[in-house]
Image: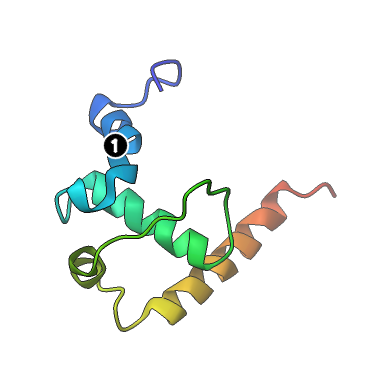
Amino acid sequence: MDFWKIEEEVAEAVLIHHKGSDNAVGSLAAIIDMADYLCAQADLGFFSELPNPNAEMISASGCEDEAAQLVQEVRDAFQEESFLFKEA
């Protein structure tokens, strides 16, 4: 992360986000953990250990009632963005 000059706060959040329930709800690490969770639900990414945020994190992120819709939005966004990297 230092090589890319990533801000220290962001680098720390990336490094600790797999702690899941140990991260404070609303913290940057918890937000990254929820993003991992949504990507895993959308079958995107590489996970040695699937993210499993606790109910409090899911509730705080607003994902409890709209998880299926958010997962589809993640899939759609991935598809759109992936076209930018395909050869013409």
Q: Which residue is more in the foreground, 16 or 6?
A: 16
Q: Would you name the residue on which mark 1 appears?
A: 16
Picture quadrant of residue 29: top left
From what the image shows, is residue 79 above or below residue 9? below
Residue depicted at 14% across the width and 50% down the height: 24
**Left or right, residue 5 beside residue 41:** left
- Please give the count of numbered marks on the rendered protein: 1
From what the image shows, is residue 29 above or below residue 76? above
Residue at the extreme right: 88
Residue depicted at 16% across the width and 56% down the height: 25
Residue at the extreme left: 24
Secondary structure of the residue carrying numbered label 1: helix
Q: How is the image coloured?
A: rainbow
Picture quadrant of residue 54: bottom left
**Left or right, residue 41 beside residue 5:** right
- Residue 88 position in % (x across, y down): 85, 50
**Left or right, residue 76 beside residue 71:** right
Residue at the extreme bottom: 65
Residue depicted at 31% across the width and 84% down the height: 65
Residue depicted at 26% across the width and 68% down the height: 58
How crowded pointer 1 is (Cα within 10 Å; few <14, some 14-19, many 20+) is rated as some
- Residue 82 position in % (x across, y down): 67, 55
Residue at the extreme top: 3
Q: Which residue is more in the foreground, 67 or 4?
A: 67
Quadrant of the snapshot with the N terminus: top left
Type of residue at label 1? Ile
- Residue 31 position in % (x across, y down): 28, 53
